Amino acid sequence: MSEQERRRIAFTVQYDGGPYHGWQLQREHRSVQGELEGVLTKVFAGPARVLGSGRTDRGVHATGQVAAVDAPVRWTAAELRRAMNALLPQEVWIARAEEVDAKFHPRYGAVSRSYAYRIGVLETASSPFHRRWCWPVGKEVDEEKLRGEAASVVGEHSFAAFAKAGQEKRGDRCVVTEAEWQRWGDLGIEFSITANRFLHHMVRYLVGTMVEIGLGRRPEGDTGRLLEAELGLTTSPPAPPEGLFLTGVRYPEGTYPTGDGGGGRLKAIQL
């Protein structure tokens, strides 16, 4: 299909990651990318390749994942969004879609990404109506300690201590522009973080370690000491994937999405 016969359409995807083995296409397991490509292949009556802004792991959710596809020129963004939402499974929904420049790439064009992680501190967080979308700790966590640990994360650091072993050699320095804890309604607390890039499992290791500090199980300041690679210090186990949401991907002004300063961040769905 030549450039004259196609248009690149970018879209924001929301999904419940519980039924999926992550975003990335897999041969033997359900994935969000696989669902999208399967639906688009039906819509286009031919093969379709979906580009994503990045991977999410098994069980991780998204309210602001960004993807793109080269569609036959007869399809407008609005028409394609309606067709996809009519065919996608109920756990996946296209929140918005629009035509973008043919060179737009949702991964390589991104300037930052944002995540949110939810902790349920009340016993009711273990309800089946909540536990799929949070970590039901079931007890109060010292929020003042959490905020102090989060403050040490802001800035440019090596996050090697907070990365899963065995990842690709892409460097371990990230620039964090936001890291804060806030109340999550009456159920608990939510960690929000924005950075130019993230390492594999980085947010989950950060949350797991900070929660242990907030529960009094490890000393205050350990987050900063881990960032400084203090000898003999290791992170706590990573927080479970159910509480993690990819909430947005930001792009330069005028690329995607238009009209909001190049933003695209959406709050995690309130349940």
Image (cartoon, grey):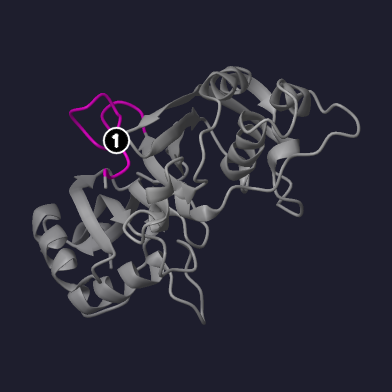
Majority secondary structure in the magenta region: loop
Counting from the top left corner in percent of width and height, residue 152 is at: 63, 18
Depth order, front residue of 149/30: 149
Vertical arrangement, residue 231 with respect to residue 65, above or below: above
Residue to which mark 1 is pinned: 264
Q: Would you say 260 lies left or right of 54 here? A: left
Q: Quadrant of residue 221?
A: top right
- Total marks in image: 1
Q: Which residue is at 54% across, 18% downward?
A: 144
The image shows residue 94 at horizontal and vertical percentages of 22, 56
Left-right relation of 235 to 55: right
**Residue 120 lies within the magenta run:** no
Residue 171 visible in image: no
Could you say where residue 261 lies in the image, as x and y percent from the top left? 26, 24
Q: Nearer the viewer, residue 161 or 54?
A: 161
Vertically, is 131 above or below 219? below
Residue occupying the point 40% across, 70% down = 19
Residue 220 percent across, percent down from the top left: 71, 22
The amino acid type, in three-letter code, at marker 1 is: Gly
Report the span colored magenta.
Answer: 251-270
Write the residue at 28% across / 45% down: 269
Above or below, comparing residue 141 to residue 16 in the picture: above
